[in-house]
């Protein structure tokens, strides 16, 4: 009897095992189809980097419209009528409170307050104040979330710009786009996860450098790929003269075989990255020309962005290209628009800068929205710091300049899980200090990663004995602006 029970138990367990195993194998097969790297021999950190978010994301991709040079918040979205009433009066020492100044104004004996040359009105259900310089953005305020309480430590362009992009004021750290690529991988194997577009405005420009989209210590596959406005948007992508696609394919196969031998011998991950990049470049030969071609865009889209969208290298053209890249699965598209450094002649220069960016920025939001893409695409607009409420140098009624001001400035965000029609944070009546809901650069970065389904404290990379992250040691998600 005991023997019979034992045999029955073995049969039952075997039947149960096989039954459950069949279900498990089916689930495993499905998982391997949905997540190709699920059963690869990866560490937990590498598994996260294979495209697995930490939690359900609000956004699938980011378009960052970076206004390089720092547009003045006092001429854009932070209305301060008291500055006009106090025009020419000296900034009270109690307001400045010994703040560090740049070398351009440190030797000034007085700091005359200067109000905006431009008028403001309130728009949308949020009642957001918008300058007359931005009539098109004014019409979409109910889609935007204005953060008027941004602040940073950096007071000069290069460290401030680098800080926004990489979380550190010194160079050679991975940029935000590289961290997103590392954390989530690519949605489209024919395109890079991180693309960079450059444009130049009419104002005084500050340079941008490749260190701003570097992969730093991450694998080189995560570096931003810069698109140019020339005949060949990506250099060296085309087949060399006299080499057809079949020959190119054979050449790449031979190079890959040699690299595989090198990888097997030394185990250098950069060798694997080279193999991947060669293959990516080959696939991009078909994908990139198709995306760069705007001839098939309907007339209503051309009117929406404005005629400049047909001129390669303009901000308008880059906004349209950003939409096309984003809808084709590029995780992070970074636009840099130079020309916002108005230390003098601010009213005239800002008028030209605003004409470059106002219509295309609003068009991008409208275009994404009507395609059903805005909810899953996070759009960001802003610079590296703000501008002083006092004049730099000489001032007249219609001509003045403003110095750098890291204590408070404004950016806006839209789509991708951000609350629309919202104004967050507030500055004092003179627009010099934050009075509520401050948002630090690391808070901003933590929030962007959170919207992409990434925990900024868990998205780390071990390098030289230390675990690094985009937000370094600080940063809190700004939950109030998230839907």
Image: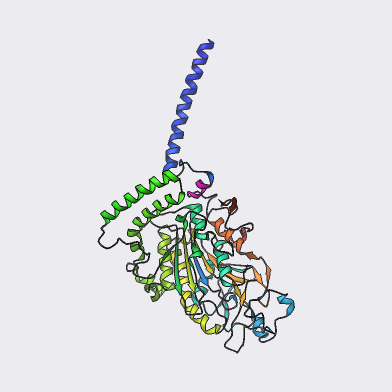
The region drawn magenta spans 45-56
Q: Nearer the viewer, residue 70 or 415?
A: 70
Structure colour scheme: rainbow
Q: Quadrant of residue 400?
A: bottom right
Confirm whether the magenta stretch covers residue 443. no
Rendered view: 41 above or below 295: above
Can you see residue 35? Answer: no
22 horizontally vs 1: left or right:
left
Can you see residue 430? Answer: yes
Could you tell me which quadrant the C terminus lies in? bottom right
Residue sitting at x 61%, y 60%: 478
85 horizontally vs 411: left or right:
right
In x, y percent, where is residue 6?
A: 52, 15
Q: Quadrant of residue 125?
A: bottom right
Q: Nearer the viewer, residue 72 or 364?
A: 72
Residue sitting at x 60%, y 89%: 397
Residue sitting at x 25%, y 61%: 242
In x, y percent, where is residue 257?
A: 35, 47
Q: Quadrant of residue 79?
A: bottom right
In x, y percent, where is residue 343?
A: 57, 81
Q: Nearer the viewer, residue 312 or 371?
A: 312
**Count of numbered badges drawn on the protein:** 0
As drawn, which residue projects farthest toward the bottom? 396
Q: Nearer the viewer, residue 464 or 85?
A: 464
269 horizontally vs 456: left or right:
left
135 horizontally vs 104: left or right:
left
In x, y percent, where is residue 50?
A: 48, 48
As drawn, which residue projects farthest toward the right? 94
């Amino acid at each position: 009897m005991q023997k019979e029970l034992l045999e029955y138990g073995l049969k039952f367990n075997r039947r149960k095992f096989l039954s459950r195993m069949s279900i498990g194998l089916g689930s495993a097969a499905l998982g391997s189809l949905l997540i190709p790297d699920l059963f690869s021999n990866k560490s937990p950190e590498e598994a996260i980097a294979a495209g697995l978010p930490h939690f359900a994301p609000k956004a699938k991709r980011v378009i960052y419209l970076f206004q390089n040079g720092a547009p003045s918040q006092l001429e854009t979205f932070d209305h301060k009528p008291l500055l006009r009433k106090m025009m020419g009066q000296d900034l009270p020492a109690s307001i400045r409170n010994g703040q560090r100044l740049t070398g351009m104004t440190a030797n000034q004996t007085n700091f005359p307050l200067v109000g905006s040359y431009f008028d403001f009105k309130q728009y949308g259900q949020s009642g957001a104040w918008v300058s007359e310089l931005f009539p098109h953005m004014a019409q979409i305020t109910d889609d935007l979330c204005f953060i008027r309480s941004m602040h940073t430590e950096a007071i000069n362009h290069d460290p401030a710009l680098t800080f926004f992009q990489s979380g550190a004021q010194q160079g050679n750290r991975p940029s935000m786009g590289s961290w997103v690529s590392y954390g989530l991988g690519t949605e489209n194997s024919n395109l890079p996860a991180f693309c960079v577009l450059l444009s130049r405005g009419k104002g005084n420009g500050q340079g941008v450098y490749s260190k701003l989209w570097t992969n730093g210590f991450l694998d080189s596959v995560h570096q931003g790929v810069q698109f140019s406005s020339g005949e060949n948007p990506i250099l060296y992508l085309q087949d060399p003269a006299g080499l057809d696609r079949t020959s190119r394919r054979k050449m790449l196969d031979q190079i890959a075989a040699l690299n595989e031998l090198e990888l097997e011998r030394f185990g250098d991950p950069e060798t694997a990255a080279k193999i991947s990049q060669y293959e990516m470049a080959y696939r991009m030969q078909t994908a990139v020309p198709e995306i760069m071609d705007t001839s098939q865009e309907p007339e209503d889209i051309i009117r929406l962005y404005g005629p400049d969208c047909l001129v390669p290298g303009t901000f308008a053209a880059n906004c349209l290209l950003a939409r096309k890249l984003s809808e084709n699965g590029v995780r992070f598209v970074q636009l840099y628009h130079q020309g916002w450094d108005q230390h003098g002649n601010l009213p005239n220069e800002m008028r030209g800068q605003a004409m470059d960016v106002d219509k295309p920025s609003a068009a991008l939001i409208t275009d994404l929205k009507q395609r059903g893409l805005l909810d899953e695409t996070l759009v960001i607009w802003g610079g590296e710091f703000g501008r002083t409420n006092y004049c730099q140098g000489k001032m007249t009624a219609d001509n003045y300049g403003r110095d750098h001001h890291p204590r408070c400035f404004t950016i806006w965000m839209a789509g991708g899980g951000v609350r629309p029609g919202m104004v967050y944070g507030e500055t004092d009546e003179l627009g010099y200090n934050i009075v509520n809901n401050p948002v630090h650069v690391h808070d901003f970065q933590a929030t962007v990663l959170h919207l992409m389904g990434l925990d900024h404290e868990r998205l780390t990379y071990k390098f030289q004995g230390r675990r690094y992250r985009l937000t370094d040691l600080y940063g809190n998600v700004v939950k109030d602006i998230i839907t």
